[in-house]
Image (cartoon, helix red, strand yellow):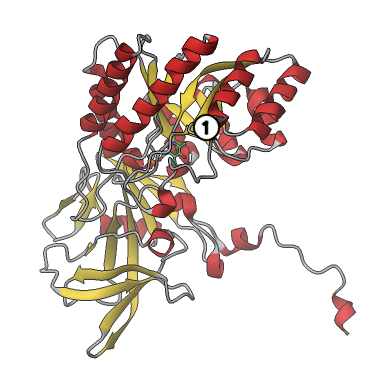
Amino acid sequence: MYGTQAINGRGHLCIGGIDTTVLAKEYGTPLYVYDTALIKSKINEFKQAFARHAGVNWQIAYASKAFSSIAIIQLIDEQGLFLDVVSGGELYTALSAGMNPKRIHFHGNNKSHAELAMALDAKIGAIIVDNFFELDLLEKMCADRNQEIDILLRVTPGVEAHTHEFIMTGQDDSKFGFNLGNGMAERAVKQSLQSLHLNLIGIHCHIGSQIFETDGFAGAIKIMIKHVSAWTHDFGFQLQVLNVGGGFGIHYTDSDRPLPIECYIDTIVTTAKKECDCYNLSLPSLWIEPGRSIVGEAGTTLYTVGSSKDIPGIRKYLSVDGGMSDNIRPSLYQAQYQAICANKANEAAQSQVALAGKCCESGDVLIKEAFLPESCTNGDLIAVFSTGAYGYSMASHYNRIANPAVIFVEDGEASLVVRRETYEDLIRQDLALKDLSRNN
Ligand SMILES: *Cc1c(COP(=O)(O)O)cnc(C)c1O
């Protein structure tokens, strides 16, 4: 159980004080349900973990790729966080939500001219420059516009976080960033310092996602500060910002043992302090970029069970009305989830089934070994937990399945924040053949 989840007297799962069977009836399934009280409490955990370190400057930017929509960005804004975007679409969403552009940072390894122009037009707070192509392009664009912008350089410290290979990003062989080890980062720092329009305020790394230990963060900080000290000595670089990215692990299943948020923050702060002392540097502002750890556990997906199939001696499949179209993570990275039967939440969950999606892919199985009540069948409601990050944001239209609705729940009130797509939405961009007679 996460956040405000509870089981009521009828044996139904409730979130934010509302019976999930009532939500399913009102909004339909599949349905993404966000417990906004839990989102706020995660944000507070991060803030308080930093606040324990007096005299340290810090900043938290929510990585909006984990879940971007107008409403979530407004909630993030209201909580005083900064925001990371990685595309024109995410930037557009943030600006449309009314986010102060100064509090927006732009990431990505292949920002287009048009995307950079959009960021410069909006006068966003900072651009995290990923490569030399971008560094040259941005310099030229700013010169043409006679505009200045704060930048950070994304570096790859050569640290391998202990996580899934596909979500590991700090190692040398990565599409992201300037390598620290081979001198690319140093060249980028030199070039930035000579720029008339780019104001280099700091460096950034993001070593991976769903990280359950602090060593990777400490290692990355040590390596970065060591290089910064050399750059300070050799060409007077003043580090104002050290951004260590996101990637803090969360609980998907009982085999996940995430550290308390303050463990990560304590390691980041104490390592940065110690290393800066060691090289006689003043402590920069410490920035982090959590995505998953802010919205992941707050999201639950509700599905309705449809068909089932029992293959004697092999396994039983229970199929739900969504699947890889609303949650690609199990098929993309063998991500594990847990589920319950939301309308039979008090019944013993002793039947092992494969919880399958409805897409035409054998790999479309949300949970290979789900434990559900023996009686769980057609019409029952399934709740899959911890789907708040990279669920809706990675949703597709595979099999022309319309994207589910998203609702926020808190204190007994539900609000629709993303409407369910309709069949008309699915064909909205389609154009008919111009000349239907050509086949005759
Ligand atoms: C994806 C990403 C994040 C957020 O990662 P989480 O695992 O969701 O915390 C932060 N910073 C950068 C640069 C990223 O690419």
Task: Using the rendered view, name the quadrant where residue 72 is placed.
Answer: top left
Looking at the image, which is closer to me, 354 or 198? 198
> Which residue is the site of mark 1?
97
Looking at the image, which is closer to me, 213 or 188? 188
Task: Classify 10 Å Cα crowding around label 1: few (below 14), some (14-19), many (20 and above).
Answer: some
User: In the rendering, at what x and y percent does residue 298 appear?
Assistant: 30, 44
Looking at the image, which is closer to me, 9 or 330? 330
Q: Split into 4 quadrants, where in the image is the C terminus?
A: bottom right
Residue 268 drawn above or below residue 276: below
Q: Secondary structure at mark 1?
A: loop
Q: Is residue 375 visible?
A: yes
Disc 1 residue: CB within 8 Å of ligand 1 = no
Task: Using the rendered view, name the quadrant where residue 324 is placed.
Answer: bottom left
Q: What residue appears at the point 19 percent right and 70 percent down from the top-left corner?
A: 372
Looking at the image, which is closer to me, 146 or 162? 162
- Asked if residue 108 lies left or right of residue 330, the reply is right
Task: Using the rendered view, name the quadrant where residue 379 is placed.
Answer: bottom left
- Asked if residue 51 lies left or right of residue 79, the reply is left
- Asked if residue 276 lies left or right of residue 254, the reply is right
User: In the rendering, at what x and y percent does residue 108 appear?
Assistant: 56, 38
Amino acid marked by disc 1: Ala
User: In the rendering, at what x and y percent does residue 250 appear?
Assistant: 27, 45
Q: What residue appears at the point 27 percent right and 34 percent down from the top-left corner?
A: 42
User: In the rendering, at what x and y percent does residue 123 appear?
Assistant: 62, 20
